Structures are given as C-alpha cells and as structure tokens.
Amino acid sequence: MTTEDRLYTLIAELTYLCPLRCVYCSNPTNLAAHPDRLSTADWLRVFKQAAELGALQLNLSGGEPLLRRDLEELVAGAHALDFYSNLITSGLPLTRPRLLKLKEAGLSSVQVSIQDSLPAEAERIAGRSSFEQKLEVARWVKELDLPLTLNVVLHRQNLGRIAEIIALAESLNVDRLELANTQYLAWALDNRAALLPSEAQLDSAREIAKAAKERLKGKIEVLFVLPDYYSTRPKACMSGWGKRYLLVTPDGLALPCHLAHTLPGLEFDNVQERSLDDIWHHSAAFAAFRGEAWMPEPCKSCDRRELDFGGCRCQAFHLTGNAAATDPACALSPQHGLITSARAAAQEAPLIPLGLRYREIRR
Amino acid sequence: MSSDASLELKPKLAPKTKLRLDPKTGKHILLYPEKGLLLNPTGAAILQKCTGEHSLEAIVALLAEEFQSDANTLRPEVLTFVQGLLDRGLLQAAP
C-alpha cells in the first residue's frame, strides 16, 4: 500500500435483484449466492466509514437499487455525509413521486441505462418490456432538474445505430452520454460471440461518437469507452486494485472491483465483521494485487506498469485461469492469442443474432 | 455549441457539479458524475465566484484583490481555466 492509495469512490451494490435480464450484466453469474444481507443501519455505517476513509463519490448501484425500500433513507444518509451520490438505475420500478422524494433526500445525479434506440431491440437485450418506462424516467429526471447521464452499453447488435442513440440522448437533453462498449466478463463473456463487434463496426461508431463529442461540447459530455479487445494495451481497471475504489456487495463483502469475489484463493472480508478502514489498510485480499510485487513479466519490467497496473485481474483469471497473469488484452501478454482469436471470429460472424443467455437467478 | 469566455460572460457552476472541501488534502474539489477535479487555491477561488452574479471581468478584479496580484496577469489564466470548464460542461453561462 502506498500513500497514493486513496479511496475516492464507494460503489454500493445494494442488491443483485433486478427486473431486467440484460445479456451483458456485470453482476456475477452466481448472483444467487449473494443475497441481500445488509440492513439500513449496516449501509449507513458503511457510508460513514467510507467518508472517513476519504470517499467523496457514492454510486448507488445493483442489480436495481430502486428495489431497496430504504433507498430514500440511504440517499439522505449519503447527503448528510456530503457525498456526491449517483443513482445507477434501469428506471424500473419507479414513479415520479418517488424520484421527487429521492431528490428531496439529497440525491446528486441519476444514471439511466437504455439498451438501444429501437424499442424492440432494446427489450430483446434487456429481456423484458422496459423501453417506454426508461424514456419516461429520463424525462422526469430532467423535469425535476436532476443531472442525467444516459448509459448505453455497446456491442455488435446496436453499434450500427450509434447515430440514432446519440440523437435520442440529444432529444432527452441529457447532461452526459456514456457510450460504453461491453466489458466481456460475467454474463457478457458467456454471450461474447453474439456481442463482440467487428473492427469495421467499431471504427465507424468511434468516428460518429468523436464527431458528436466535438459538436456537443459544452452541452452534452459524450464518453466513448473503447473495448479492450480492440486496443493493444489493457485498461487501468478500477484505476488500479485497491487504489481509488471500494465496492460492497449486497451480502456485505468489501471488494476492490465488481467481480473480485469470483477470483479463487482470495478471502474478502465482510463489512459486518470488519471496519472499512481495517479492510482497506490491512486485509490480505486488498493487498494481493496492490503495487508491483505480484506482477509477472512482461508487466514487471514494462514502462506502462504504473499506468495500467497490468490490466484487469478478473479478465486475466476468466480467460487464462490465472488471476496473477498479465491481462491478455495486452498485446505483450503471452496469452494475447485468446483475444485475437475472439476478434478474428467477430470479423466473420453473421450479423444475424445468435442465441443469447439471459441473466437469471438460479436457486 | 459551448459559450466562448468573453469578459462579459457570467459563469456559474453547472447543476451536475458539487464544489466541496476534500478533508484529506485540505484542497477544494469539483465533483461531477464519476469524477472529481482537485483544485489549486486559485482554481477554487475562481469557482467560488462562479455564481452567475459576477462577470468574468469582475471575477478577475476580485481575484486581483484577494491574491494581491495584477489583473492583467491574472486575466489570461482565468479565461483559459474558465473556457476549459465551459467546454467540459462544468461551468455554464448565466443568462
């Protein structure tokens, strides 16, 4: 742990339950193993401990955070601690009066996801009827003068409509548009063949996004997040393991990222048993991939090791079986072939939708 | 299109932002969705005056007094800083 490791953002995954069944959900595929176990008081204590550690941002996420009946109380607690609180939601189930209550409780901003600009396609990806409700929620957010981010996960089945998606964001007068290419982990890894775009699709979408970013400068902040499958260097996942972020799961595990609990050999602590301060500074799991001691070659001697930290530990594990391997998204990784072969298959795959595995809770 | 920072413009913080003190560093930080901009004392002093009431020229004058500095030296720095934040949608032009 270095003096630079400073918690800025607490990600509170309040529940893994969700009315949607998105085929690229970032929750773990064994989500039933992590039921809601934290009470209102538990969450409020976690918020306080995170603020004491230095956290300034709070992402209220899930699953679907609106399914927590105590969300208003949690937002009020965050407000009392002076957090910038961001509700990351599908928009279901929500009424305008409840949104007003959340605003009055001190919510700072709202991020609503849509799956596509075409209603039928959006609902096929989400696995249920939801499109009209989402647009309605986006309009309520603006009417109530709350800052609105529209989040759209991109993949081969909607990249061709990026211009329409941007136009929809403009018509909703969003403050921020997050065009995020799918991260191929969890449910998205299972559906990779159906979702991974071709290079040509991606290049053309990137150009359109770039032009929109310039055109909308000062009006809508447009972010286009490239998929690491099409870059030569890995992402600085979470800005480094245990450096800026801490995530708490519905059952109380404190993690450095969304899927760390899918890595073998690491024991994550529960916020019901240890304080965040103790976990952040002293837990073995948070120490596991901090710094450089764990790094293999080519990371260990790479001049980018302090920029990308060796990439994503979860991607390394889920593709190579070794969480301490160089992220195969890096062209210098000896296992980069795992990425290039997937990419090669994506150039040829037909645009006709393949079968999709929907997110589901198996009991 | 974003506004160009002329000296008559009255900048104000965008609704998506929150300006607060970061207790860990003692510096001000401008928070917005998923991000934060840690500010030096001048940056913080500028943003505290971006309430929509003061024109940029008035802000420059206030800063010159506050920092015992020359307005002509401050002016270009303030314009660059404000323009950058207008482009990022973190500041807006008040009507």
Image (spheres, grey):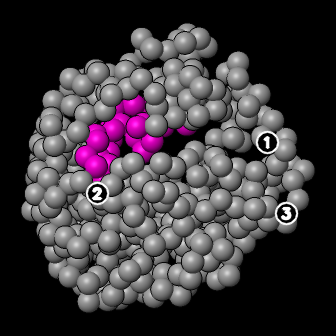
Tell me the kind of residue under disc 3.
Answer: Leu
Tell me the kind of residue under disc 2.
Answer: Asp
Mark 3 chain: A
Q: Nearer the viewer, residue A184 or B31?
A: A184
Q: For the point 59% across and 26% down, which residue is it?
A: A321
Location of mark 2 (residue): A36
Q: Name the front one of labels 1 and 2.
A: 2
- Checking the image for residue A343, the label placed there is 1
Q: Is A93 on the left or on the right of A207, as rendered?
A: left
Magenta region: which residues?
A233-261
| Whether residue B30 is visible | no
What percent of the width, then of the height, locates residue A54? 18, 41
Sequence order check, earlier mark of 1 and 2: 2
Q: Secondary structure at mark 1?
A: helix
Mark 2 chain: A
- The residue carrying pointer 3 sits among few (fewer than 14), some (14 to 19) or many (20 or more) residues within 10 Å by Cα, namely few
Sequence order check, earlier mark of 2 and 3: 2
Location of mark 3 (residue): A351
Q: Nearer the viewer, residue A193 or A35?
A: A35
| Whether residue A76 is visible | yes
Q: For the point 69% across and 32% down, which residue is it?
A: A232
Mark 1 chain: A
Tell me the kind of residue under disc 1.
Answer: Arg
Corner quadrant of residue A97: bottom left
Is residue B25 a member of the stretch shown in magenta? no
Q: Vertical placement of A317 versus A210: above or below?
A: above
Is residue A238 a member of the stretch shown in magenta? yes
